[in-house]
Image (cartoon, rainbow, N blue to C red):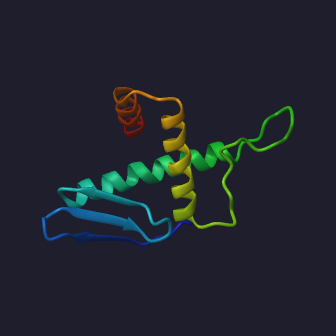
Amino acid sequence: MSAETTVTVTRSDDGRYTAVDAETGAFGEGDSKVDALADLLELLQAFRKVEEASSKTTADTGVRTETSVDTDIGPLERYERLSARIQNRVHEEDTADDVVEDAIEWARSQ
């Protein structure tokens, strides 16, 4: 991600806040501006971890891992593709809801 980016925070009619990163399209939501920004920060940190993991190559073959990031598409499409892959994997492995909830809680704590 670039050194500078714009984050827009808006308040909806129901009083909740949404913080949107203009560069990635990622957004966070919360009951306050701080909560929305903290939620956005968690998501951006997760994006960064995915991008860092995707840039690693297999030592033996030099081939990029299956999580490689396609640089020809925008951040929103990368997010949507990653989200679809995760949803498919959860569905294919018939992962229990409580396991998914625990994984989400763990990811948010990182």
Please tell me which residue is depicted at 39% across the width and 48% down the height of the picture: 42
x, y (%) of residue 87?
A: 49, 43
x, y (%) of residue 69?
A: 66, 54
> On the rendered image, what quadrant is the N terminus found in?
bottom right
Please tell me which residue is depicted at 32% across the width and 52% down the height of the picture: 38
> On the rendered image, what quadrant is the C terminus found in?
top left
Q: Seen from this angle, which residue lies furthest left? A: 14
Please tell me which residue is depicted at 39% across the width and 37% down the height of the picture: 104
Q: Is residue 47 left or right of residue 6?
A: right
The answer to which of 13 and 40 lies nearer the viewer is 13
Q: Seen from this angle, which residue lies furthest right? A: 61
Q: Quadrant of residue 25?
A: bottom left
Q: Give the number of marks.
A: 0
Q: Is residue 79 left or right of residue 107?
A: right
Relative to 7, does residue 91 appear above or below in the rendering? above
Relative to 8, does residue 56 appear above or below in the rendering? above
x, y (%) of residue 24?
A: 50, 65
Q: Is residue 16 left or right of residue 3?
A: left
Q: Is residue 33 left or right of residue 59?
A: left
Please tell me which residue is depicted at 68% across the width and 58% down the height of the picture: 70
The answer to which of 63 and 97 lies nearer the viewer is 97
The answer to which of 83 and 107 lies nearer the viewer is 83
